[in-house]
Image: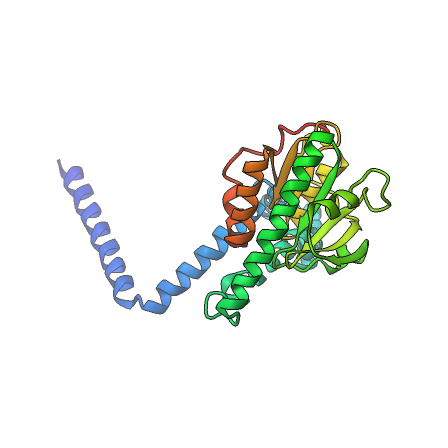
Amino acid sequence: MDWIQNSWESLSNWLQSVGAIMLELIGSFKLTDAIDILIVSFIIYSAIKLVRETRAEQLVKGLLVMLLAWFLSSYLQLYMIKSFFNYFFQFGLLAFLVVFQPEIRRALEQIGRSRITSGKGWFSMVSPKEAEQKKQQETKCINAVVEACASFQKSKTGALIVFEMQTKLGDIINTGTVVDAEPSAPLIGNIFWTKAPLHDGAMVVRGGKVYAAGCILPLTKSDSVSVDLGTRHRAAIGMSENSDAVVTVVSEETGQISIAVKGVLTRNYTRETLRSELEHLLLEGSEAGEKLTDKIPSIRKGKKR
């Protein structure tokens, strides 16, 4: 019975010590500490969200394995391996910037497109009249694109149309020919006519106008993309991965209409659903594109263009 009593007394003393420490921590806890914890938690959550289901996820796993090996080499006194890792991690920051350059660039672009940095969360310099004119121009462009894509769907004419959002696509536009014309279905039809000189490239829409055609887009490097997808669809996905652009694709082989946003390709659009989706993505704001990724699992169901 004595050992039970001694154990109970030890447990009581330990609980009292823990309680005293907790009370001391709570007493010294300030509002700035809560803000600090919330900011760090948000940064960690954003980093996990950024690398999840990308090539960076595998790189992070490899880095964690190397850190574990470094710790074990130190613990087991494996001097050669420890020296190797010491030299490696001396240049860890530089290696981190090189290896994660695409993800870091994407994160900085997302910060630049946020409401705080763009000013949308504070005030708007656009008058109601200008906003209405812009909306009318965007609606006119959407109608022209929808009519053209519906025609392409019937004739199985390939098309690749990029709607520029907040991220400017000057480098992409420079690879093609500037048109800067009012949108219309006949104009878009002429651009993607199979014997036209600009039909193989992408058409870029800026400010509700057909701004450039024959542009070259970057291809996606994602390993999760179906091997059945052709170059046109891979270019659409790649463009949406490298910017916040909304990309519409018409398959040359099947006539199927697709939309790529934030690296996700959704398919099987009709005239009505295409119009509804483009109005949602372009007229209701670029942040609506984030909701598109929840509609289908991924881009693995695609067929060759």
Residue positioned 62% across, 54% down in the render: 106
Residue positioned 69% across, 36% down in the render: 151
Say whether residue 260 is left or right of residue 18.
right
Say which of 129 and 43 sits in front: 129
The colour scheme of the drawn protein is: rainbow
Which quadrant of the rendered structure holds the N terminus? top left
Instruction: Locate residue 17, reporting x and y percent.
Output: 24, 56
- In the picture shown, does residue 65 fall above or below 229? below
Say which of 17 and 119 sits in front: 119
Instruction: Locate residue 177, reporting x and y percent.
Output: 82, 55
Say whether residue 24 is left or right of residue 246.
left
Instruction: Locate residue 235, reporting x and y percent.
Output: 73, 42
Residue 73 visible at all: no
Which quadrant of the rendered structure holds the C terminus? top right
Residue positioned 54% across, 37% down in the render: 273
Residue 139 visible at all: yes
Residue positioned 45% across, 59% down in the render: 40
- In the picture shown, does residue 189 fall above or below 13? above
Q: How many marks?
A: 0
Instruction: Locate residue 304, reporting x and y percent.
Output: 72, 28
Say which of 149 and 202 sits in front: 149
